[in-house]
Image (cartoon, rainbow, N blue to C red):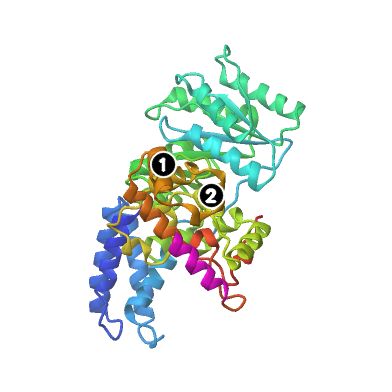
Amino acid sequence: MFESLSDRLDSAFKVLSGSHKITELNVAESIKEIRRALVAADVNYKIAKDFTDRVKEKALGTENVLKSVSPGQLMIKIVSDELTELMGGQTVGINVKGHPGVVLVAGLQGSGKTTFSGKLAKYLKEQRKMRPLLVACDVYRPAAIEQLSVLAESIGVAVYKEIENKNPVDIARNAVAFAKANSHDVVIVDTAGRLAVDEVMMDEVENIKKALSPTETLFVVDSMTGQDAVNTAEAFNKRINFDGVVLTKLDGDTRGGAALTIKHTVGKPIKFVSQGEKLDALDVFYPDRMAQRILGMGDIVSLVEKAQMEFDDEEAKRLEKRIKQNRFDFNDFLGQMQMIKKMGDLKSLMSMIPGMDKALKDAPIDDKALLRVEAIIQSMTPWERSNPDSINLSRKKRLARGCGQNIDQINLFMKNFSQMRQMMHQVSKMPAGKMGMPPGAGGMGLPAPKGGISRFKKR
């Protein structure tokens, strides 16, 4: 995500490295590189020029101040502030108030509307403690209703569908009546899309909106389509006047133009961003945090928030006690690893750590490695999981056969586990508040908030 843009901006800031002060000459050269980086990221040239003009004005306005700050650092700060403003400045939440609240989800076919609807239902159920009702109003796409039903079942949420009814307006009305009668406090309506903007689709979405008067209308856009996404958003906004944007597929090969300019162009905030197919891969959009990630500054706040949602305080205390007693076993390790997996894919997590994107740029970060470790542990007997020191050569050979790996891979895992276990035991003897990371995260290279593992509380 934004990898090419980040690299180009980094090169633009290097123009100022070695300079002792801001001058018109070195700023002009840096600004030219920043403009090129934005245009290469599929940002409209006029927007890119306006952006760099503001950056230049602010940079030259600080020529004689902040002498303790290097020109490169100052330029990064200015660009970070301007990127934040370009993407909306403030975080704007979703409005689900009402009896029930109604969220209308619109967008082109293939943008990820149905998957997002499932993700949003899961988010509202877990984060807002609501009872969502998913509504299948895409009556044209083959298997669309079935897809929504499968998603609903996987997260334990009800779905409203009328298989024989081909009138999406009637289905939507009936769904709201059903929600009122069955105590659902939010209705999420998944509408049909087309491969391109056309009158039939626009009329249908417009009619559904008039019939429901939704509290929130969200436009879902595939961020990989770049500037085309912005143009499509403009067309939709003119017809249905949506409340916010959802950017999907940010984990793909996206140049970032849509994320950077859609708020500036359409005047509507980005409310959510989605990465990957997992139903928990949905994040509230924070313009300042996204700007920091684009500039390679990481996003520790989001990383810690993800950790806080998964790590339970009582479990952390139990594990801390086991580590101090040197009793941390494969059951503990497997549980911690599964919690880390819930936080998202490893590459996304690593990108939140400052500088990690560059440090691991060419390193393979494979989530399948976690699956291989799980396979090894799950091939063990309950007694073996509780007694790590019992794994001798004959047991290793049996494990290799059981998990489909070779003996060298088993040996490497055992060696790494033993070293991690020993390190955690040694760290646990340090004074209180010095441990610095939860037990499962230590082996994965993830940071933790100050105060040790007891600071991770489940919300």
Residue bearing mark 2? 385
Per the rendering, the mark at residue 138 is: none
Badge 2 amino acid: Arg
Tag 1 and tag 2, C-beta contact below 8 Å = no
Which one is in front, 322 or 346? 322
Q: Quadrant of residue 72?
A: bottom left
Q: Is residue 60 magenta?
A: no
Q: Position of residue 150 (x, y in %)?
A: 54, 27
Label 2: how many Cα within 10 Å (few below 14, some 14–19, many 20+): many
Query: How far is mark 1 from mark 2, CA to CA?
Result: 14 Å
N-terminal of the pair, mark 1 or mark 2, is 2
Q: Main secondary structure of the magenta part?
A: helix
Badge 1 amino acid: Arg
Residue bearing mark 1? 398
Q: Position of residue 52 (x, y in %)?
A: 33, 65
Image height of 208 relative to 350, above or below: above
Label 1: how many Cα within 10 Å (few below 14, some 14–19, many 20+): some
Which one is in front, 168 or 190? 190
Q: Which residue is drawn at the image coordinates 40% and 71% (left, top)?
A: 78
Q: Position of residue 235 (x, y in %)?
A: 43, 37
Image height of 254 relative to 82, above or below: above
* Residue 446 visible to the viewer: no
Left or right: residue 349 versus residue 72 is right
Magenta-colored span: 418-429
Q: Which residue is drawn at the image coordinates 48% and 69% (left, top)?
A: 423
* Residue 278 visible to the viewer: yes
Quick one: quadrant of the C terminus? bottom right
Which one is in front, 416 or 402? 402
